[in-house]
Amino acid sequence: MQLGEPGRLQSAINITPLVDVVLVLLIIFMVVAPHMRQGAGPDVDMPATATPPEQAADRARILVTIDEHGSLWIDDKPIAAEGLGDGLRAAAATEPDTKIVIKGDARLPFGEVRKTMVAIELAGFHGVGLIAEHAGTATRGG
Amino acid sequence: MQVDRGATGLGLQSEINITPLVDVVLVLLIIFMVVVPLAMKGYDVETPQTSVQAVPTPADDVQVVLSIVPTACPMLEPQVGDGIPKSCRVSLGEQEIPATDLPARVAAVMGGRPKDKRVLFLLADDRLNYEGVLRIVDLAKLKVNDMTIEIIAAN
């Protein structure tokens, strides 16, 4: 019935490689997505501001999370406030030029975050990033 | 030239139709790409160096201190909604100004300075809400690029 048939020409584009690539991309995104959202660590209400600048990704990062009660995490490990400096130095042992990024709960008093910044400074890390999210995309439940 | 007409000759389609699969997968991919905010966002701040020899402040530069106190800027409670309280006033240098004037005022002070001298000292009361303080930092940085924020404490 089909006119092209007797010549055995293949008129359809071979989309198998496309499907392969797209599937692999999809899987990469699904795997990486949870880590990208807030970094590691427990979920906290991130502060929402109008124009948070993007954090440069040129240095290795360690995420310090402070939840609404003031408890601390280094990446996904809970840590006591007194152990923060030692924990950070141990975590950054292989990579001395590590940047510390603080993900503090929006409901915290500023002093709680400042104390943590001082502890980080005393541990020998200079400059921290304070994580915020864009106010329009805030995903805050109640 | 005709070799194997086989199934094709009978009009049977032996290949699986993968078009719907591709559609679904592409849509999923796009959803994931949109939902995932790719980069971490946040403000880079400094705390004053604690080592003794690291404080050579050039005397010819006026230090600009942005101070926020709860009596002038009522932000003790967790913030509701976006933005900062309308009544919020902050002190920039010696002057008390409405927080909403911050972008223009900071730009006026910092605009003419070379990049390494654009330092804003932030003195915020410890009782203030963290999110509120970050929103003020956001306002202060709005119109100035490459400004360093130094967090200092009252005592």
Image (cartoon, rainbow, N blue to C red):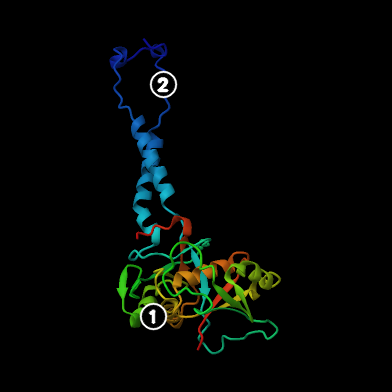
Query: Nearest the camera: A55 or A45?
Result: A45
The amino acid sitting under disc 2 is Gln
The amino acid sitting under disc 1 is Gly
Q: Position of residue A141 (x, y in %)?
A: 35, 59
In the picture of the structure, the residue carrying the numbered disc 1 is A85
In the picture of the structure, the residue carrying the numbered disc 2 is A10
**CA–CA distance in space, label 2 to label 1:** 66 Å
Q: Position of residue B88 (x, y in %)?
A: 54, 72
Decide: few, some or many residues near mark 1? Use Cα within 10 Å; few <14, some 14-19, many ≥20.
some
| Chain of the residue where label 2 is placed in the rendered structure | A
- Residue A75 shows in this picture: yes
- Residue A100 shows in this picture: no
Query: Nearest the camera: A52 or B55?
Result: A52
Query: Nearest the camera: A89 or A85?
Result: A85
Q: How many marks?
A: 2
Looking at the picture, does residue A107 appear above or below residue A35?
A: below
Tag 2's secondary structure?
loop
